[in-house]
Amino acid sequence: MKAILIDDEKPALQHLERLLLKDGRLEITGKYTSARRGLEHLERDKTDIVFLDIGMPEMNGLEAGEYIAGLDRSTRIVYITAYSEYAIEAFELNAADYLLKPVTSQRLSKTLERLQKSEVRTESLPKSAVPVKELSILCFKRLEFTDSMEPGRKMQWRTSKAQEVFALLLHNRGQWIMKDTIVDLVWPDFKPEKAVTNLHTTVYHIRKLLKAWDMEVLVEFSQERYRLTKEKVLLDVEEFERGYSGTPVESDEEWLRRENVLKLYRGDYLEEHHYDWAEIRRKELQVRYIRMALHSAEYELSSGRPRQALDRLLDLQAVDPYSDQICRLALRSYADLGDFIGFRTHYDKYKELLERDLGIRPDQVMDSWVQKVL
């Protein structure tokens, strides 16, 4: 395996080189006191392992790790630091291992054994041994992962900010987002240096979580920007939009197909998380859902299923309580059922809601129709 060493302290760099040469298990192809020079090496030559100091003045080791992951995600990083709290944090995130200064030959030997075992497992695992999974990401109502092989499996975000950064990247999937933009949206009250450190830590946690779920989702970093890409992972929002139709329902087959699409909508987009940046998208999807569901309710009424239509419309009214179209169809459902007590009660509650919340009354045409029916 090939390795390069990056540490701004030349004595520490030489000490680590001597230990590795004495051990003999790795081929050292470069050693640098500058993170940027080390990254230039990685751009030219593929490297298996990078021994990377965390506390460098020119570029923080965690930030350098972002660039390395962007160049080649198979490159493993062993962080080195004189401060144990940073080393442990790095290890908890997504490092192959960590070493505390001064590095000892015994501790380094354990790291190399761990790296070798990991290499053997990766090479020897047959593709047929990997079980086939159907993994999904859900965004309606709340952000969740689901695994078809473990239906009850729960995801564990390290912090609410990690969840928000992932949601933001997923919201903009496939598009590059400037690091400063993410920081401004997620940590608006933090000092820039502290916010950027939090972002690097958060991204490591996200990658660790995705790896634990075996998801083919990448969080990439390049030119001070982040991007999320995915393959073979279902996303409920994409499935909803693929199946969306804003035209009237023409047949039972079409009604049934749309039912499967409407069931994806468990609640508004990221409803429980209250992200301001998701508000426009939330409203767009809500409007589409209501329009599609109204067409299904109209078809149910026209095909003699007023009870089914009413149940749907009452659910819709919880989403958009002021809609006169939803109220009108609900009243029509009560009338078709012959439930005129329910008809009057529903209309009276609707009038009260409009007057209390908006200071208006139902339009005259609707009111005249109601009085005629009653």
Image (cartoon, rainbow, N blue to C red):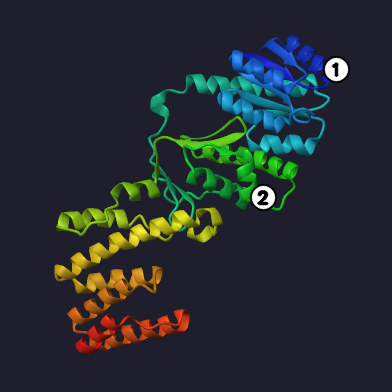
Quarter containing the N terminus: top right
- Residue 102 visible in the shown view: yes
Q: Residue at x 46, y 84 (%)?
A: 356
Residue 191, how many percent across, how many down? Answer: 75, 47
Label 2 vs label 1: CA separation?
Answer: 38 Å
Image quadrant in which you'd find residue 113: top right
Q: Mark 2 points at which residue?
A: 187
Q: What residue type is labelled 1?
A: Pro
Q: Is mark 2 on a helix, strand or loop?
A: loop
Residue 117, how many percent across, how many down? Answer: 59, 22
Q: What element carries label 1?
A: helix
Quarter containing the C terminus: bottom left
In the rendered view, tell whether residue 308 sits above or below residue 184: below
| Closer-to-camera residue (148/40) | 40
Marks 2,1: beta carbons within 8 A: no
Image quadrant in which you'd find residue 224: top right
Label 2 crowding class (10 Å Cα cut-off): few <14, some 14-19, many 20+? some
Residue mark closest to the camera, 2 vs 1:
2
Q: Mark 1 points at which residue?
A: 11
Label 1 crowding class (10 Å Cα cut-off): few <14, some 14-19, many 20+? few
